[in-house]
Amino acid sequence: MNTRILAALALTAALAASAGCGDDGGAGPAGIPPSSGGVGGPVIVLAAASLTESFTTIGKNFEAQNPGTKVTFSFAGSPQLAQQITAGAPADVFAAASPATMKTVTDQGDAAGTPVTFVKNQLVIAVPKGNPKGLTSLAALAGPGVKVALCAAQVPCGAASTKALAAAGVRLTPVTEEQDVKAALAKVKLGEVDAALVYRTDARAAASDVDGVEFPESAKAINEYPIAALTAAPNPAGAAAFVAYVQSPPAQRVLADAGFQQP
């Protein structure tokens, strides 16, 4: 519990610093009209690492539609964020990469209402650009001399990897297990491993450095992403507005462009 409280305090300080250096909204991307809903102030969103690129864009668009708002994000592994929430970290919204992780929050009564699934995601094999080792299947990852990075089993991308490997009947020993999907992908980008199992969206976001190899067993391990406003949200109106915006057509287009699937 002491570790969780320290994590919550650290997140509080980081979010306060981030919010303090932000602007007050102002003009945003063209074609996004301002809202007349009276939403304003800071909105603190804790979101799975795999949402980094798409939620950053969605946050800017939300601010443009709601002048006077400032969205502050904390991206990390979903279990880490869930622990911070249950330890009392200040946040308005939680977007997780799996229902199991969201359940950690709902079981403690920290979610306001029922979480809503807003997208799905699927795994690919991330390999260095050009796929120098010709890795085209999960079975190939278990070959001699192949170094593989996986997400840790308790992380949603790790749980999905376990399911996919079981569906393929493949057993492998990774050289590293990471706490979020971005860290696993970084091992490929840095040339420290030959492959990693990551979400399709993350491979697409890093397309200048890696290739994403599709494999059929990924269909057996599709992750649903739930989102919820939080019970102790400092800005309940902003939290509700952000959750609603994520489900809106403009935000869903951003997510689809990133490679997410419809719920």
Image: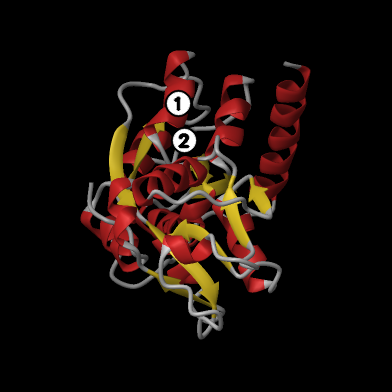
- Residue 249 appears in view: yes
In the displayed structure image, the side of residue 124 where residue 152 appears, left or right: right
First along the sequence among labels 2 and 1: 2
Query: Around disc 1, counting alpha carbons within 10 Å, would you say few (fewer than 14), some (14 to 19), or many (20 or more)?
Result: many
Farthest residue toward the front?
144
| Front residue of 195 and 199 | 195
SS label for mark 1: loop
Residue drawn at 63 percent across, 45 percent down: 179
Above or below, 129 against 7 in this view is below
In the displayed structure image, the side of residue 86 where residue 60 appears, left or right: left
- The location of residue 124, given as percent across then percent down, is 41, 62
Residue drawn at 68 percent across, 55 percent down: 175
| Quadrant of the image occupied by residue 260 | bottom left
Q: Which residue is mark 1?
A: 230
SS label for mark 2: strand
Dot 2 amino acid type: Phe
- The location of residue 79, given as percent across then percent down, is 56, 33
Query: Around disc 2, counting alpha carbons within 10 Å, would you say few (fewer than 14), some (14 to 19), or many (20 or more)?
Result: many
Residue drawn at 64 percent across, 64 percent down: 147
Question: Is there a contact, CB below 8 Å, between mark 2 and mark 1?
Answer: yes
- The location of residue 37, given as percent across then percent down, is 30, 41
Q: CA distance from mark 2 to mark 1?
A: 7 Å
Q: Which residue is mark 2?
A: 94
Dot 1 amino acid type: Leu
In the displayed structure image, the side of residue 184 where residue 256 appears, left or right: left
